[in-house]
Amino acid sequence: MTRTAFKSHIISALLGLLCPIALIAQEHRGHHGKKGQDSAQTANEYMHRSSTGELVTRFDSPERDAYQHPEKVLAWLGDLKGKTIVDIGAGSGYFAFRFAREGARVIAADVDDGFQEVIRKRIEQEGLPNIETRKVPYDDPGLASGEADKVVLVNVYHHIENREAYFAKVLKGTKPGGELVIIDFFKVPVPVGPPVDHKIAMDQVIAELKEAGYRSFSIDVNLLPYQYLIRAR
């Protein structure tokens, strides 16, 4: 995929944000509830064609480092020291442990027992007291009211069921002045990530988060080669 193709996609997606939210919401009210659930199930079934061990190897690979640019993401997130960061869909702990090393209190949340066990073993090996695991269901982030300074989802948004209701709960679980961070793949063919039909375009993410109660958005489409970054408050 050329940079020109990416820019064309980005421009198209950003133009979509200018459409009246009522028009977007009307489409999603008619179809989103079932479609959101079906796509989440399909994405999860697709991912778990691979074993937990295979997924951990893939998630923590040098190939991922090459496109994920974790140090750039950490710099973009800003100072994390002393903040409570909830990493939803933490998987192998790729970002959770990086957040912890930056001095954050980290809750590594996931639906999968296998991933949770991987993280617990890594916590013991690395001796990090500021990271904990939390098993959560597909339909609830498992947050207490005002618990998190930041809630972060990396390559996870398309796995969430009933997203508008789910992220309304995330919003309630975020402190005043806190934020939700979504990092996910452009909805175009790229060498990494899930199939295109599993991906969620930026304009759809924004529309769904507005329905969930978010009002302020900041978008970066230049930091990473294959992914957009969204801050929502």
Image (cartoon, rainbow, N blue to C red):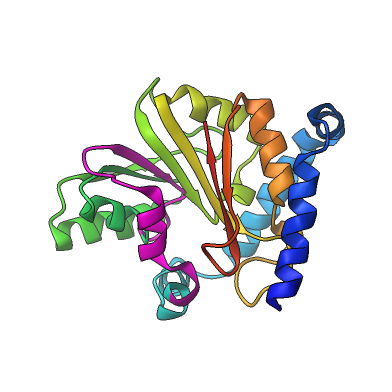
**How many callouts does the rendering have?**
0
User: Is residue 88 inside the magenta stretch?
Assistant: yes
Q: Residue at x 57, y 26 (%)?
A: 168
Relative to 80, 221 lies left or right: right
Q: Is residue 101 above or below residue 204?
A: below
Q: Nearer the viewer, residue 157 or 2?
A: 2
Q: Nearer the viewer, residue 20 or 155?
A: 20
User: Is residue 59 inside the magenta stretch?
Assistant: no
Give the magenta range. 66-93
Relative to 211, 79 lies left or right: left
Image-quadrant location for residue 207: top right
Image-quadrant location for residue 56: bottom left
Position in image of residue 218 (x %, y %) = 56, 42
Relative to 166, 76 lies left or right: left
Q: Is residue 85 above or below residue 125?
A: above
Q: Residue at x 15, y 47 (%)?
A: 129
Q: Is residue 60 above or below residue 117?
A: below
Any part of residue 73 in sight:
yes
Position in image of residue 224 (x %, y %) = 53, 65
The quarter of the image holding the N terminus is bottom right
Q: Residue at x 45, y 77 (%)?
A: 66
Q: Nearer the viewer, residue 200 or 92?
A: 200
Position in image of residue 155 (x %, y %) = 55, 56
Any part of residue 115 in sight:
no
Q: Nearer the viewer, residue 227 or 115?
A: 227
